[in-house]
Image (spheres, rainbow, N blue to C red):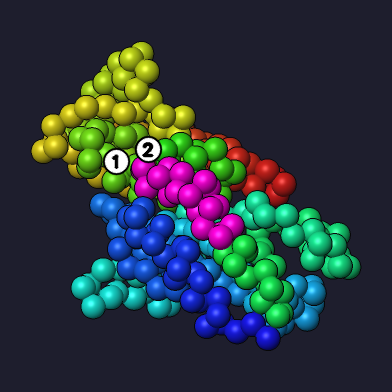
Amino acid sequence: MISSPDIDKLLRRYLSPILRENGFAKVTARKAWGWQDHCVSVLQIRAVGSYFSDVTGWPPMSVCAWTGVYYDFIPFEGHTPPRRDEKGRLVPDEAYCHMRSHLSRSLDQSRFTDQLSNPAERARRDIWWFERDGSNIEETIEDIALRFVSEGKPWFDRYTDLSKTLADIEAERDCYNKFYKAEHLLNSLAWKRNIICTHRRESWRKLVWGSDSPRAAQLGRAAEREGRCSPLSEVYVRAPADAWRYVAMGTSFIEIRGKGFWMQDSILELWLRLLSLHIEDPSDDTPLASRIRDNCASCFTRLLWRLHPSQT
């Protein structure tokens, strides 16, 4: 009967030296970490376990090879932050990583997987089958090592390059996680490249040159003509580092006499509603009071329709 120490021994023999040669400074039998600037590369070999085995039919010692990259400039959100090693370096679990994937098996194991009852399980390529007697253990671990070289190394190279990471995030479907990661990646790239970025997405941030937003727009148009724009951001503009300041970015711009500010739609909706309730009906024919009342009601109706079209 095969045991975990048997697998660990061969992982150390075949996989660990390759990981060290490719920048992983802390390597155990089943986990490895590498540090490059603000990126922590993580590789984790994880057994499927007894419960998965009982449900699907895969042997419990079968493994997946998970890859991940953790960015230390993205604030941690959760209950337990990633651990640090004796040198103070972050050693996050693969599940904590901001970019995650897995290695795919190239070894033909159909002689084992064909006995599985579920067609979806028979088609899986993200699990390596270990026979219970260990008869195929060596060839299987060799394949894991080869797949790291051919698939894992290029993956880590891509996602430790922040520009390439941002390009892939841009292609993801719109969701909170996408915009949260993109915001911090753009901020990190901005500080590294000395640029100003402006965005239209809710909860993102806007870098403005001082308080002169028309100037930023002018520079943005020039940047766009030169092809220096990203699909997610409107502007990538070179500027002196001491000319930056951060301004919170909402979804609606409120302008009063040529000046204005960004505000979240939910706050703006409440503000307009309260304002309209506190303006009395004009008792005379004063045009100003009538216009204020009418404009507030009109703005509130249009905003409510834009936010909640099904309720209007």
Q: Residue at x 11, y 38 (%)?
A: 242
Q: Is residue 46 above or below residue 14?
A: below
Of callouts 1 and 2, the N-terminal one: 2
Majority secondary structure in the magenta region: helix
Give 97 or 262, whichever is nearer the viewer.
97
Q: Residue at x 57, y 64 (%)?
A: 141
In the orientation shown, which residue stands out farthest toward the top? 225
Please provide the residue range marked out in magenta.
142-163
Q: Amino acid at mark 2?
A: Ser
In the orientation shown, which residue stands out farthest toward the right? 117
Q: Residue at x 70, y 49 (%)?
A: 311
Quadrant in the rendering for residue 215 = top left
Q: Is residue 192 above or below residue 78?
A: above
From the top left corner, tell me how far across and down residue 76 is, in percent: 37, 66
Rendered-image quadrant of the C terminus: top right
Rendered-image quadrant of the N terminus: bottom right
Give 107 or 42, whichever is nearer the viewer.
107
**262 in magenta:** no
**144 in magenta:** yes
Residue 163: mark in rendering: 2
Residue that carries the numbered disc 1 in the rendered image? 189
Give 193 or 196, whichever is nearer the viewer.
193
